[in-house]
Amino acid sequence: MTAGHQQERMPVAEQKRWFLAGVIEGEGSVCVSLKEHPNARFGLYVDPEFFIYQLQDYRPLLEIALQVFGTGRIFPKPGNERVLVYAITNRRSLAEKVVPFLRKYMKYSPRKQIYATFCEIVEQMERKEHHTAEGLKGIIEKAYRLNPTAKGKARKRSLEEATGRILRDHTPDPLMYSGER
């Protein structure tokens, strides 16, 4: 059987997923923002997000993403109305839809390490590791390593400032380390 025949046998839904992987490679991004929040346990809120960008003329590509993931929204990019953004910002949707997709379809991507790190962060947050000082510190360290070659996008605070803020007023529970729990 020739390669052409094998390709014809791939279901349309699977073809769309592989096509979408190519769109994501060229026009997609993941980020993990750190936001100050007075009600957050350690004063910082971790916010993972997934985006695909396209000019308005190519909205059908974003609609394929909406169809494949079954969640997210499409909106004009603030500051550049000619560009549309497809975004998934809900952590549960990221964990249930985006993480499995990235793990399966982006494994050949030159950015696969970025995607793997993003997936690890989302999975750690699903396990509620960000509810402890050490867990949050680890997540933030990964977030700072996520995309070191970003196009001129620098974080507002240094890694040391962000992690120092978490641990500044944190005193470990002595019973945690004594084995009495």
Image: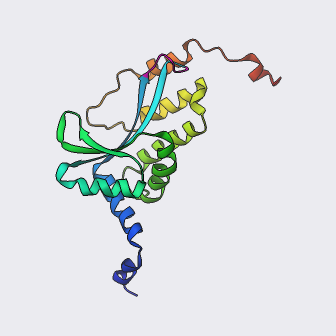
For the C terminus, which image quadrant?
Answer: top right
- Magenta: main secondary structure equals loop
Q: Where is residue 135 in the image (x, y as percent from the top left)?
A: 58, 30
* Extreme-bottom residue of the structure: 1
* Extreme-right residue of the structure: 180
Q: Position of residue 28 (x, y in %)?
A: 32, 48
* Extreme-top residue of the structure: 169
Above or below residue 122? Residue 131 is above
68 with respect to 99 (left or right)? left
The magenta segment is: 36-41
Q: Which is more toward the observer, 61 or 151? A: 61
Residue in view at x 26 percent, y 32 percent? 152
60 with respect to 93 (left or right)? left
Residue in view at x 19 percent, y 49 percent? 56
Residue 64 part of the magenta segment? no
Q: Which is more toward the observer, 175 or 84? A: 84
172 with respect to 152 (left or right)? right
Residue 38 part of the magenta segment? yes
Residue in view at x 51 percent, y 49 percent? 96
For the N terminus, which image quadrant?
Answer: bottom left
Q: Where is residue 125 in the image (x, y as percent from the top left)?
A: 55, 36
- Coloring scheme of the render? rainbow
Q: Which is more toward the observer, 117 or 73? A: 73
Above or below residue 63? Residue 170 is above
